[in-house]
Amino acid sequence: MLLSQLFSKCLSVSYTKAGVSANYALKRDGTTLYIFFEDSDGKTDWKNNVDFPAKAYRRMGKTVWFAHRGFLRVWQEILPLIAADVADRHFQKIIVAGYSHGGALALLCHEYVWFHRPDLRQTAKGVGFGAPRVLWGVKTPSVKKRFENFTVVRNLQDVVTFLPPAILGYFHVGNLIKIGQKGKYSPTEAHYAKNILTELLVYEQTLRSQNSTPPNV
């Protein structure tokens, strides 16, 4: 599935609310499980977005790493509701995707899949469309390894993908795909879903014209 197709699904799927502000969707297609996370929806989401002091995330074995406190809080509301599906050995591939605020949750979910389904570490994929930075501190090899199959899609000047600021210690992990044209959109307009989708389609068509294969999941 092309990234543009995955993003379209992420935008059109029907979401379920969990806890105070978490919105997620599970889609099952044979032995493939899709987990989607919605963008910011309401004042509570925005409150979590700006609650960016880092918090230690100690649940993953001996490795201690730090994440955006607000996103971590929302992720922990959703986690109990999807844990059984992630653990279900019927699923031989898990694809996680989210837009904006949901892209941050997708990153945390992807890491959860990586840790709890070691049999899928080569095939599980995660994508954050217009996703903000989530991790904080030192980008160690052991942390980087968890996100080798995670991709952040940035529509060049998209302001959300530059938040929280790197100067505060936050960083992206995984693969960063840059789409769009410099100066075509304002930093805010570059984050609009319709513009991300438009530029994804242009990006994929450009790769085809160069006889290259567009990235897929």
Image: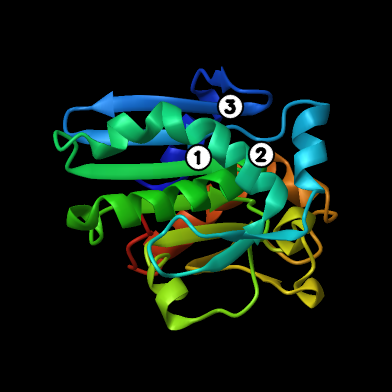
Left/right of residue 167 with respect to residue 26 in the rendered view: right
Left/right of residue 188 with respect to residue 214 in the rendered view: right
Rendered-image quadrant of the N terminus:
top left
Residue position marked by numbered label 2 in the rendering: 193
Q: Which mark is residue 7?
A: 1
Q: Residue furthest left?
A: 90
Residue position marked by numbered label 3 in the rendering: 23
Which mark is in front, 3 or 1? 3
Which mark is in front, 2 or 3? 3
Q: Can you tell which quarter of the image residue 55 is in?
A: bottom right
Q: Position of residue 99 (x, y in %)?
A: 60, 41
Dot 2 or dot 3: first in sequence order is 3
Q: How many C-alpha atoms fall within 10 Å of the one at disc 2: few (<14), some, or many (≥20)?
A: some
Q: How many C-alpha atoms fall within 10 Å of the one at disc 1: few (<14), some, or many (≥20)?
A: many
Q: Can you tell which quarter of the image residue 46 is in?
A: top right
User: Which element is circle 3 on?
Assistant: strand
Dot 2 or dot 1: first in sequence order is 1
User: Which element is circle 2 on?
Assistant: helix
Left/right of residue 93 with respect to residue 115 in the rendered view: left
Q: Which mark is residue 30?
A: none
Residue appearing at x 75%, y 54% in the figure: 160
Q: Position of residue 192 (x, y in %)?
A: 73, 41
Mark 2: amino acid: Ala
Left/right of residue 122 with respect to residue 173 in the rendered view: left
User: Which element is circle 1 on?
Assistant: helix
